Image: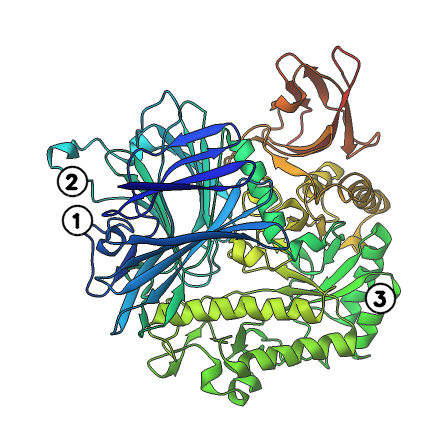
Amino acid sequence: MTHDFQWGNNRLSLFFHWDDDAPVSIGRITSDDVDMRIDDNLPLVEIMAAGFGHWIACERLVSTSIGAGMRYVSHHSDKSENGINSLHVRMENRTAGLQADVTYQLPTNQTTFRTFVTVTNIGNRPISLESVTSWVSLFGSTPGAQQDAGSWKLLHGAFAWLGENRWHSEKTEDLFPQLSQELTGNNPRNEYKAISTGTWSTGHQAPLAVLCNKSHTATWIFQVEHNGAWRWEVGDYTVDGYMALSGPTNEDHSWSKCLAPGQTFTSVPASVTLASSFQSAYDSLIAYRRTFGTHVAKDQYPLVVFNDYMNTINGDPTTEKLLPLIDSAAEVGAQVFCIDCGWYDDSGDWWPSVGEWKPSTTRFPGGFAEVIDAIVSRGMVPGLWMEPEVVGVRSPIAAALPNTAFFQRNGRRVVEQDRYLLDFRADKAREYMDSVVDRLIGEFGIGYFKFDYNVSPGAGTDNQADSLGDGLLGHNRAYCGWLDALHERYPNLILENCSSGGMREDFMQTSHFRVQSTSDQQDYRLYPPIAASSPMMTVPEQTANWAYPQASMSLEEIAFNLNTSMLGRLFISGFLNAMDEDQRNLIAQAVQTYKYHIQPIVSRAVPFWPMGLPGWTDKALALGLRYDQSALVTVWARNPAGEESNVVLSLPDFADSAVDIHTIFPTGERFAPWKILWDQNAAKLRLQAPERRFTSRTILVTRKEAQGQSRL
């Protein structure tokens, strides 16, 4: 007998069904104007464990014998005080002795939901888990279309140090070759997968991906929410394509978790949205991030940050160098002044000696308080850089803390580039870092910390863990717990997440920080594609793209540089004190433009891409923010040959509307005007940049009642 039930909110519904001899599956999802039918069955959860493999040989997350053997037990729903609707579906596999509770969380009036699975050993002997999916589904089809694994496009992100957020689109028909597997009666064995290892969760690939069908009637966005090891995959399931998301696995991450009878394990979360278009799905994802990113939500007016590092002091701060920068930063309007690395160093070789986090006595002869007081006296919040998860091998803290406070393998501390790695599962590790933060806040009034992480421990730690991956997962979760406690003790403290730039941009990590550094890229000409694509992983109010103007630059180059940071959280470096009056005035103009036009609206604006997501070498690229009846768009023209650049921006929200168009930065007679023409019938804004090698403008577009073309 077939059974079914429905759950959701006013915008999204999930339809579940099962038979007495088959696991629970999702058979249909409706989301606003999308009706997605899923005509075949995949279990809600797939589990690998020692002694239980796949029911058909493969290396996929799906087709597991435990998943196929799951049977419905019960389901119930509830709603929290903050408007989160939850569904809990319980299944059991009596043969394996496992119970799976699948939880779905859906905010009111939203269409992105979170899902995770809690596995319980209900048998009478231990069982070793080797993978647990957080989300599994077939692609599905909309009315009038056939289920077809090859009829979609996959958008996925490549990451590298200095080259984050490079997004690529591929046809699934190219990923899934035609194999005539029907003749064998079996599904293909291969899959397209993205995998992260260690703690750089976005060191190589993004834990987020997008599926758009060819008919442009449906778009999935899915992401693994974990600041460590994860895996997602898509593949051909013959009747349709499938997607599966997971945290660490035995195959990829040396992860296993032994459950004694009665013990439980909860998978890492995943989140999923379904909409009729990419932009609609992305809009839903941004709303979801702002709902679950509770620390990000504190920044209604994100403060302008000056950081002394990038292409400036570069980790060698002294009183003599900092005081002129502090004055210059205040004069242009900065609201936070962050002293980056090196403030604790007396030796000149601080990399292997970090860990005490006490101010240098040689760099600041008048005392560190002299520098901090200068920041405060100029009306700015004082900030400091730290790496809270590492201790240098030459640091006195390396001997002061016990071995249990560090990552270990086979009884020895893990060492990476002269660093030991703190294990935040250990009370001693957390207590020590609590004492450091408390001391710096108590003694100096620090209101901003930049937390960096420049090494990765590899597979993990086997100390007090069932496996290397188990130890790593435990540390990652404990680190997030430590951050939560830090926010609770200091609710106004601003935390920045930096991991060699954007090496940890997963949502679990970014949701714990109010600021996200997007890259260590030092070439201002290469930064725009990173800046334009970074909202794929963040909300704009936390997105910190570096602007590092220099006295050697022309005014156009400085404006190009500053626009890279404009449509996010303005984040400035550079020797401002070495600049002439025109250069300083231009930086002050950028700050005032940000405070007037962007700061009040960025925390409710939604990013969009009027030229599509950029390629790494694109000569012209753009990023926009939509809000109310307006849009802000930054356009970069990169033309080393110095020729004119013709740019076309697609603005469908303003179709058939007359608009006012203003260039808001840079402005003034020193800047050649761009030719701008609005085609309201085609909803295209056509721009012509003058003959410059690197030039950029930020433009404000506002709907107006009068009809016709607007021209500037």
Which residue does the numbered mark 3 point to in the structure image?
Answer: 376
SS of the residue under disc 1: loop
Q: Is residue 474 above or below residue 406?
A: above
- Real-space Cα distance between discs 3 and 1? 65 Å
Numbered disc in front, either 3 or 2: 2
Report crowding for label 2: few under 14, some 14 to 19, many 20 or more residues within 10 A (C-alpha).
few
Q: Is residue 373 left or right of residue 174?
A: right
Residue occupying the point 60% across, 81% down: 432
Residue occupying the point 15% across, 33% down: 182
Across and down, in percent, residue 281 comes to: 52, 36
Kind of residue at disc 1: Ile
SS of the residue under disc 3: helix
Across and down, in percent, residue 480 comes to: 55, 66
| Residue 520, image quadrant | bottom right
In terms of sequence position, does the residue under pointer 3 or pointer 2 come before the other?
2
- Quadrant housing the C terminus: top right
| Residue 50, image quadrant | bottom left
Kind of residue at disc 2: Asn
Please say if the residues under marks 1 and 2 sit with CB atoms less than 8 Å apart: yes
- Quadrant housing the N terminus: top left
Which residue does the numbered mark 2 point to in the structure image?
Answer: 186
Across and down, in percent, residue 643 comes to: 62, 24
Kind of residue at disc 3: Val
Report crowding for label 3: few under 14, some 14 to 19, many 20 or more residues within 10 A (C-alpha).
some
Q: Is residue 264 left or right of residue 69?
A: right
Number of on-image labels:
3
Q: Is residue 565 above or below residue 349?
A: above
- Real-space Cα distance between discs 1 and 2? 8 Å
SS of the residue under disc 2: loop
Report crowding for label 1: few under 14, some 14 to 19, many 20 or more residues within 10 A (C-alpha).
some
| Residue 634, image quadrant | top right
